[in-house]
Image: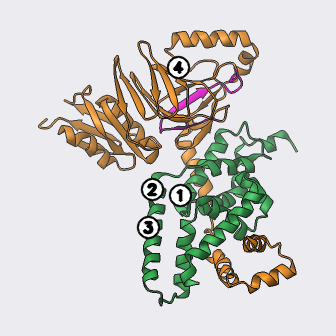
């Protein structure tokens, strides 16, 4: 293999990296922010950062680099607002069903509520849980992606599930 | 405690057959299982249109070619000669006029994403701004040149200087915002302390304090509590700031050009405008002073009433 084929600054190489990592990165950001447009924009930003630093990042390190940047990425105010709105909607809806204990949830409504409860989880718990459940990642892989210990991964997983169960208690 | 252990082992698929039996007998098991089973349907992200996203990437990149990192090829040679580098450093500091010095081998202008400095402090740049620093010579020359506006979050225990054409900001603490535009300089300290040194002033700011310099007159102010500068939340805010600075920011944020007729550009503006709605932004600037405006494509004309 020649050096050129591994140069991240080569458009062809960069495009390959984009194609093989963008979906995973998008998923990760989607777990993080629960917002499709936001996640898409951040994917663009994160790859922009890789392009800006293509001379410093080797092809082997590119994937790790992308996830580190994604993990530190910031969301803008709109995302904060929409999440805040979701939380509020969640609180309101949970109040209303506390008032009506007989209320029977349809399947769709259960999923709705699960979705809301998921959005209301602390970001790091949600990301950890979904990396495990949706991506099927191993404890060790999650620890590497998030830059935390395996013990912390276990703690977050357990906390996330406990919280979801408590929040959904009346519809389970 | 025991239950929690069982739960996390179940999540990780590490239960022994006996433990699994025990766990499945618990009241909570069916509830956990119901959540667990429903998660993929609720939380699986949509498929990303890879080709479209890649196309968009290059389109947006090519629309702003300046965001690519420029590494000056001769920098390595310079860094090799420590003595001359130091001399140039001192020389350019004395000159102070051209804030982008020759010792800097990194120039970055990507906005709204954290840029990591060699000591792992970060700076987030506002649109149309850039920083330059020496990556290889960081140990000798711990300084960052800034044109425009940036929010710095400094790693604990780290120190460096932020150089602008209007003055030098020395880091004594953890997070601060610097905005420079022509002869305008504004520094706001959000955490810790920073020192601002200009040709005629030497001020130390503690958290929650701001300092503003317009030509030679200075203003000190307190800021209302909040962790981030407004521009990071999609707003541009000003306090008693000359209109030419405000309009220049408007031009940068919207990629437009602003012309004025009969408008006093030295008069000051206090207020803010959104960075994602041009009409509201111009209204926010012109209405308080009773100015009229017209928008034609990428040009904005602001005139005095009756003219």
Earlier in the chain: of badge 2 and badge 3, it is 2
Q: Which residues are magenta?
A: B121-139
CA neighbours of label 1 inside 10 A, class few (<14), some (14 to 19), many (20+): some
The answer as to whether the residues below labels 4 and 3 share one chain is no
Question: On the same chain: label 2 and label 4?
Answer: no
Give the chain letter for orange.
B
Helix, strand or loop status at disc 3: helix
Labels 2 & 3 near each other (Cβ < 8 A): no
Quadrant in the picture for residue A143: bottom right
Distance between the alpha carbons at the discs numbered 2 and 4 = 35 Å
Per the rendering, the mark at residue A78 is: 2
Where residue A88 is drawn, which disc sits there? 3
Q: Which chain is green?
A: A
Q: What separation in Å lies between label 2 and label 1 (alpha carbons)?
A: 9 Å
Helix, strand, or loop for circle 2?
helix
Residue at 81% in and 84% down: B21
Q: Earlier in the sequence, mark 2 or mark 1?
A: 1
């Amino acid at each position: 293999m020649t050096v050129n084929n591994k140069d991240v600054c080569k458009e062809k190489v960069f495009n390959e990296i984009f194609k093989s990592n963008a979906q995973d990165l998008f998923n990760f950001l989607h777990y993080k922010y629960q917002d499709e447009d936001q996640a898409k924009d951040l994917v663009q930003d994160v790859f922009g950062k890789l392009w800006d630093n293509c001379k410093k990042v080797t092809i082997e390190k590119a994937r790790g680099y992308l996830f580190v940047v994604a993990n530190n990425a910031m969301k803008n105010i709109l995302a904060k607002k929409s999440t805040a709105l979701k939380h509020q909607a969640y609180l309101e809806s949970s109040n209303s069903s506390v008032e009506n204990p007989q209320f029977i949830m349809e399947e769709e409504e259960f999923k709705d509520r699960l979705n809301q409860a998921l959005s209301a989880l602390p970001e790091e718990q949600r990301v950890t849980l979904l990396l495990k459940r949706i991506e099927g990642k191993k404890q060790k892989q999650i620890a590497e992606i998030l830059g935390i210990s395996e013990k912390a991964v276990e703690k977050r997983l357990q906390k996330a599930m406990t919280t979801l169960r408590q929040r959904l208690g009346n519809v389970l | 405690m025991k239950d929690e252990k069982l739960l996390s082992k179940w999540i990780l698929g590490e239960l022994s057959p006996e433990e699994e039996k025990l766990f499945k007998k618990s009241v909570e098991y069916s509830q956990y299982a119901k959540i667990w089973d429903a998660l993929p349907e609720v939380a699986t992200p949509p498929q990303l249109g890879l080709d479209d996203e890649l196309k968009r990437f290059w389109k947006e990149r090519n629309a702003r070619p300046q965001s690519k990192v420029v590494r000056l090829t001769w920098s390595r040679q310079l860094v090799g000669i420590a003595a001359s580098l130091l001399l140039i450093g001192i020389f350019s500091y004395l000159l102070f006029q051209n804030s982008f010095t020759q010792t800097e081998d990194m120039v970055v202008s990507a906005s709204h994403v954290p840029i990591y400095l060699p000591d792992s402090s970060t700076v987030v740049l506002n649109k149309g701004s850039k920083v330059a620093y020496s990556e290889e010579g960081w140990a000798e020359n711990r300084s960052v040149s800034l044109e425009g506006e940036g929010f710095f979050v400094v790693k604990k225990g780290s120190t460096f200087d932020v150089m602008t054409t209007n003055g030098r900001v020395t880091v004594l603490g953890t997070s601060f915002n610097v905005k420079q535009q022509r002869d305008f300089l504004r520094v706001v300290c959000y955490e810790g302390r920073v020192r601002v040194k200009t040709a005629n002033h030497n001020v130390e700011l503690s958290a929650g304090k701001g300092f503003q310099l317009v030509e030679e007159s200075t203003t000190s102010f307190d800021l209302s509590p909040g962790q981030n500068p407004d521009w990071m939340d999609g707003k541009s805010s000003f306090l008693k700031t000359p209109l030419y600075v405000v309009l220049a920011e408007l031009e940068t944020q919207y990629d437009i050009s602003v012309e004025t007729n009969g408008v006093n550009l030295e008069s000051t503006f206090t207020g803010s405008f959104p960075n994602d709605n041009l009409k509201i932004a111009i209204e926010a600037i012109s209405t308080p002073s009773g100015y009229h405006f017209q928008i034609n494509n990428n040009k904005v004309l602001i005139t005095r009433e009756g003219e």
